[in-house]
């Protein structure tokens, strides 16, 4: 059958051999990163818990006179390379956006007392990273994917969205 002289077979082989129509080129998706830092004080506690409960759960982070961390943010933005500019996004724009939405508001502040985002929200690293994500998400082009990692110490860090 493979060497069938049937003209219909030959026709179909010819059509298979015809060069494919040009496909639209998919722009490469690339992740771009920006690091930012802020220093802030906080206290982890629940006002509706007793001192003993707060101490048992939050330990040193429950110190009533506050304590500080040197926080580090890694902001990751994923999207296609813009064929006009060669950028996923201008990192200067991302830098300014992180400053306006996050570090100008959080740096050298008491997160519990000075930052309205944490009124009634325990400023754990987990809660802080979600607040940071939501602020940046609202300001960023919706077509771009966003991930935020927050280091509370060199060894303790969180990421949102998870996975
Ligand atoms: Ni702490």
Image (cartoon, rainbow, N blue to C red):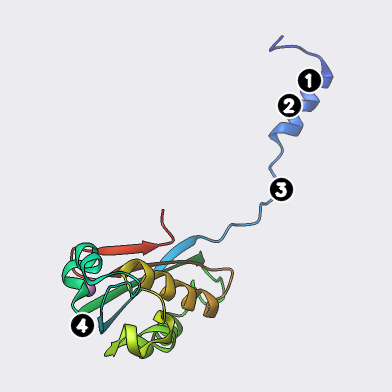
> Is residue 36 toward the left or the right of residue 4 in the image?
left
Q: What element carries label 3?
A: loop
Query: Which marked residue is nearer to the observer: mark 4 or mark 3?
Result: 4
Distance in Å between CA atoms under marks 4 and 2 = 77 Å
The one nearer the camera, 147 or 34, is 147
Distance in Å between CA atoms under marks 1 and 3 = 22 Å
**Image: 16 above or below 151:** above
Earlier-in-chain disc, 2 versus 3: 2
> Is residue 43 toward the left or the right of residue 119 in the image?
left
Q: Can residue 33 be seen in this view?
A: no
Earlier-in-chain disc, 1 versus 3: 1
The one nearer the camera, 123 or 46, is 46
Please give the residue where the numbered disc 3 appears in the rendered image: 21
Please give the residue where the numbered disc 1 appears in the rendered image: 9
Q: Is mark 2 on a helix, strand or loop?
A: helix
**Image: 56 above or below 38:** above
């Amino acid at each position: 059958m493979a060497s069938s002289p049937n003209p219909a077979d030959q026709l179909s082989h010819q059509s298979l051999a015809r060069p494919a129509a040009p496909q639209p080129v998919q722009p490469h998706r690339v992740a771009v990163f920006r690091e930012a830092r802020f220093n802030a004080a906080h206290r982890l506690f629940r006002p509706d818990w007793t001192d003993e409960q707060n101490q048992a759960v939050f330990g040193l982070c429950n110190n009533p006179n506050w304590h500080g961390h040197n926080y580090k943010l890694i902001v990751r933005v994923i999207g296609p390379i813009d064929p006009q500019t060669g950028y996923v996004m201008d990192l200067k724009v991302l830098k300014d956006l992180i400053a306006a939405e996050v570090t100008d508001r959080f740096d050298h502040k008491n997160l519990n007392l000075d930052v309205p985002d944490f009124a009634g929200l325990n400023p754990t690293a987990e809660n802080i990273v979600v607040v940071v994500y939501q602020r940046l998400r609202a300001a960023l082009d919706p077509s771009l994917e966003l991930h935020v990692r927050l280091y509370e110490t060199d060894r303790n860090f969180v990421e949102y969205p998870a996975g």
